[in-house]
Amino acid sequence: MKKEKTEELFVKWIDGLLTPEEEAQLAAAMESDPGMKAELQELKKISESVVSEVPASVEPPYGDFFNSKLMRKIDLQIQSQRPAKKAERWWQSMRWAWAPVSALALVLSFFAGHRISRPADPLAQKKTFVEFTAELPTVYFTGEALDAEVIADFEGDVSAIVVNGLSAIRDDIDFVTVNTSASLPESYESSEARRFH
Amino acid sequence: MEAIGSMSVQLIFATDGDPEIAGKLAKEMTVTDLKKLQGIKEIKFEHYRLLGVDKPVILKGYESWATPLRPSKEILVSFQPIKRSGDERIQMVLEYWQSKRKVFSTNPELKKGKTLYLLGPEWRKGRMILAVKIEELKKL
């Protein structure tokens, strides 16, 4: 099954909109990849927790707002990687993009709660709310339980991103002499070679 | 390989305690930079010290890296341009790496000449702040 079709089925499954034929197709895909079912269950829980954050009195701009925004985040993530770095099981990249923290950050940014500084400048306020929130960056985390706030300035440009919950750097680390044994991606060496050789 | 601009990535130590704890390599910030930092409530501290800076070129379609603590690779920033929005703006994927491990990434739209601050981890009773600014951007 083509990747785009599977993605479409995922989204419809989460929203409970699969036709019987589509349910059978997705069931067959899950049979061939047992890990997929567990991942999808997790994604559905995240989706439900995101929706539960939406006040009942406020309608999203359009019916597919959250799913389309979350899928856009995934597309950005995939675009930013070179083909060699894409996950073998491509849909596993969704786990990173669908982290509960980033989903909640999207919800919070959508409702512009206390975490986002709304621009006070009348010129900036000519943007619609959807345009403003669509332009806010998203933050992706890799493993740690993290929290992020996006702060915009009076012109509506992002001026700061505050990431809380990161592990502290050891106080005794001397940045001049420390040398972690792990290796960096090939792109780092290529970047350095372009600059200095 | 097309160079479309350049950027600066500063690593700043911010603390409400003694700034000397950052060590001998830490330098005082300029008055202009201090004002910008203290103008944002969420990253306002009593003292700031500049730990290092790197000014890499931005290449269209390529992932590049900034090493603000060169030669140390303890803290790195990778960046890749995604999209231009006019002559003054560019959206990028920025990744923060610590101890050769990717910690988080984000995809902000940056305006030439405007600094984006990323408030990072704690260190020696203070916080690390990355200051990312587009210095030059080729006109479309």
Image: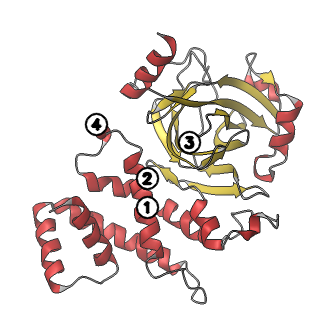
Crowd rating for badge 1 (residues with CA inside 10 Å; few <14, some 14–19, many 20+): few
Residue at which label 1 appears = A72
At a point 60% along the width and 15% down the height, the residue shown is A176
How packed mark 3 is, by other alpha carbons closer than 10 Å (few <14, some 14-19, many 20 or more), is some
Q: In the image, is residue B120 above or below residue A67?
A: above
> What secondary structure is marked by label 2?
helix
**Mark 3 — on which chain does it sit?**
A
Classify A25 as above or below A80.
below
Which residue position holds label 3?
A: A167
Q: How crowded is mark 4: few (under 14 residues within 10 Å), some or many (20 or more)?
A: few
Q: Residue at x 75, y 63 (%)?
A: A124
Q: Do the residues labelled 2 and 4 touch (CB within 8 Å)?
A: no
User: Based on the displayed image, in which of its 4 quarters is residue B49 positioned?
Assistant: top right
- Whole-angstrom CA distance, mark 1 to mark 2, is 6 Å
Q: Mark 1 and mark 2, same subunit?
A: yes
Residue B2 at x, y = what percent? 48, 28
Q: Earlier in the sequence, mark 3 or mark 2?
A: 2
Single out the residue that lies furthest toward the bottom.
A57
Q: Mark 4 points at which residue?
A: A84
Alpha carbons under labels 4 and 1: distance apart:
21 Å
